[in-house]
Image (tube, rainbow, N blue to C red):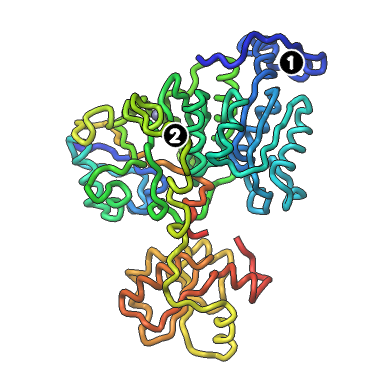
């Protein structure tokens, strides 16, 4: 069953410049695993060394935060939209590691 | 709904009645609301991209007291989006420039400038006199500082953030909903912040997001409508789409949860990992200066000059004879380089090229140097006719 995963602007460079990807999955965990196996560079931006979602990355199924659902066990259904929402900072000095 | 001001006792002058007539004739504002605005005290952090529409619209709307915190000076790269500043203001403190613009728009507004770097020592003192804090700085240390200070003082924090084409906005008000730490307990470590785009942003975007912050601030003052409390607004300017996510109060939140671990302000620069050595880029790769590079060129020494910036940066300016291999392409294109050649690698300021040199050295390149300071140093010391960005 294919669900849509919306990739935020800062992470598109690690996901083949795509703004969304269709993944076959029945839980959020499966969808993110499918996504990171397709785009390996995404993994370290989404997960820490223990394989847990990073604290500055939130994942939503439709408009609900999975931390308040069943986390990565949250079931997803056809036509559900999974959104990855990292914290962003525009004019940030730490955003600008090259400036 | 927060009640921010007591029953209004002051009055509007005839000039003010005329000035605010388009508010006064709408029932959602009317005289009551306009007097609330006049009594309101709003603190605007930052007089930059988001701070511009915030300050301009709040002043025009008749907010009585507008505090502004900033210690920056206007530069040319600000003018593309920070329209509170004029070309003539380049080189002036942002607060002076902003105050002049606000005075021109509405002389009834009392502007209180705080020309200082907001930190854990001064934040509580500055914040305590205000009803609402609107954060227009858009950087992680200030964002966590503003969040925590607002939670500790029980004040609403009107939040906005932008990244290239994408914006976020919300109202964090721990008394009535989640705070920023409920959403993101910790900031990203600097090395993982995914971008080399140096704060690239479409000029209109902060105008839109900052205007939403101004709107939410005014709604809080008036006590009208449904504020963005408990909701995160996402704006995608490229697709022109607004989306909304639900934010919930996190009982484990370190600052507004049931057992808070943050009970006073901390060192936010350290918290965000940008203090001291950690922020200093890797410089343990062999380097040469732009003057040495120029000497190599003048002496017609054979070497390969590699530019690891992006193609769109290469279009802005380049050092003659350089070969463009964007940093991300270096691994798959390093076969185009010969490890027997002398190689000099450069970027805009020398950080990305240091990474490239580090990578290439690991791959067996030995006669390789990083150009200290990149094209910025080249433009400054060798070719002043070169444009910089
Ligand atoms: Zn909280």
Q: Indicate the position of residue A66 as horizontal and vertical percent values.
A: 27, 32
Q: Secondary structure at mark 1?
A: helix
Residue B160 versus residue B271 in the image, above or below: above
Q: Indicate the position of residue B272 as horizontal and vertical percent values.
A: 44, 47
Q: Indicate the position of residue B184 as horizontal and vertical percent values.
A: 38, 37
- Is residue B370 visible in the rendered structure shown here? yes
Q: Chain of mark 1?
A: B
**Which residue does the numbered mark 2 point to in the structure image?**
B234
- Is residue B241 visible in the rendered structure shown here? no
Packing grade of label 2 (10 A; few <14, some 14-19, many >=20) is many
**Which residue does the numbered mark 1 point to in the structure image?**
B21
Q: What's the residue at 77%, 13% (across, down)?
A: B12
Which of B355/B312 is in front? B355
Which of B341/B51 is in front? B51
Dividing the picture into quadrants, the one containing residue B334 is bottom left
Which of B204/B32 is in front? B32
Circle on res. B313: none
If the picture is divided into quarters, which one holds ligand 1? Answer: top left
């Amino acid at each position: 069953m294919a669900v849509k995963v919306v990739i935020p602007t800062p992470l598109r460079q690690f996901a083949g410049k795509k703004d969304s990807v269709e993944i076959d999955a029945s839980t959020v965990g499966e969808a993110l695993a499918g996504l990171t196996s397709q785009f390996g560079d995404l993994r370290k931006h989404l997960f820490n060394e223990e394989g847990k979602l990073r604290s500055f990355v939130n994942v939503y199924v439709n408009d609900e935060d999975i931390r308040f659902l069943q986390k990565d066990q949250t079931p997803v259904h056809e036509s559900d939209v999974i959104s990855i929402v990292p914290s962003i900072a525009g004019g940030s000095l730490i955003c600008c590691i090259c400036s | 709904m927060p009640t921010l001001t007591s029953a209004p006792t002051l009055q509007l002058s005839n000039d003010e009645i005329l000035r605010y007539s388009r508010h006064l004739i709408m029932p959602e504002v009317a005289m009551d609301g306009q007097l609330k605005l006049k009594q309101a005290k709003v603190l605007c952090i930052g007089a930059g991209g988001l701070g511009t529409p915030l300050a301009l619209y709040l002043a025009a709307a008749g907010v009585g007291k507008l505090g502004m915190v900033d210690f920056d000076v206007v530069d040319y790269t600000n003018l593309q989006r920070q329209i509170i500043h004029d070309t003539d203001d380049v080189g002036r403190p942002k607060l002076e420039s902003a105050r002049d613009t606000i005075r021109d728009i509405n002389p009834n507004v009392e502007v209180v400038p705080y020309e200082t770097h907001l930190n854990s020592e001064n934040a509580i003192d500055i914040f305590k006199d205000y009803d609402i804090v609107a954060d227009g700085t858009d950087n992680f240390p200030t964002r966590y500082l503003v969040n925590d200070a607002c939670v500790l003082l029980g004040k609403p924090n009107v939040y906005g953030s932008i990244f290239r084409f994408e914006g976020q906005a919300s109202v964090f008000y721990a008394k009535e909903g989640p705070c920023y730490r409920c959403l993101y307990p910790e900031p990203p470590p600097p090395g993982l912040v995914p971008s080399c785009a140096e704060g690239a942003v479409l000029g209109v975007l902060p105008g839109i997001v900052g205007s939403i912050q101004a709107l939410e601030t005014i709604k809080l003052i008036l006590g009208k409508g449904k504020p963005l409390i408990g909701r995160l607004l996402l704006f995608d300017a490229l697709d022109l789409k607004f989306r909304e996510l639900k934010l919930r109060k996190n009982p484990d939140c370190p600052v507004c949860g049931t057992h808070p671990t943050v009970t006073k302000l901390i060192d936010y620069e350290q918290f965000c990992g940008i203090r001291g050595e950690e922020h200093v880029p890797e410089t343990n790769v062999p380097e040469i200066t732009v003057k040495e590079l120029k000497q190599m060129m003048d002496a017609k020494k054979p070497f390969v000059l590699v530019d690891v910036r992006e193609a769109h940066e290469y279009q802005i300016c380049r050092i003659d004879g350089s070969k463009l291999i964007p940093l991300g392409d270096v691994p798959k294109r390093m076969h185009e380089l010969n490890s027997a050649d002398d190689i000099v690698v450069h970027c805009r300021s020398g950080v990305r090229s240091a990474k490239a040199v580090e990578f290439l050295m690991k791959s067996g390149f030995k006669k390789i140097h990083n150009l200290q300071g990149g094209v910025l140093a080249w433009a400054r010391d060798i070719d002043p006719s070169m444009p910089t960005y």
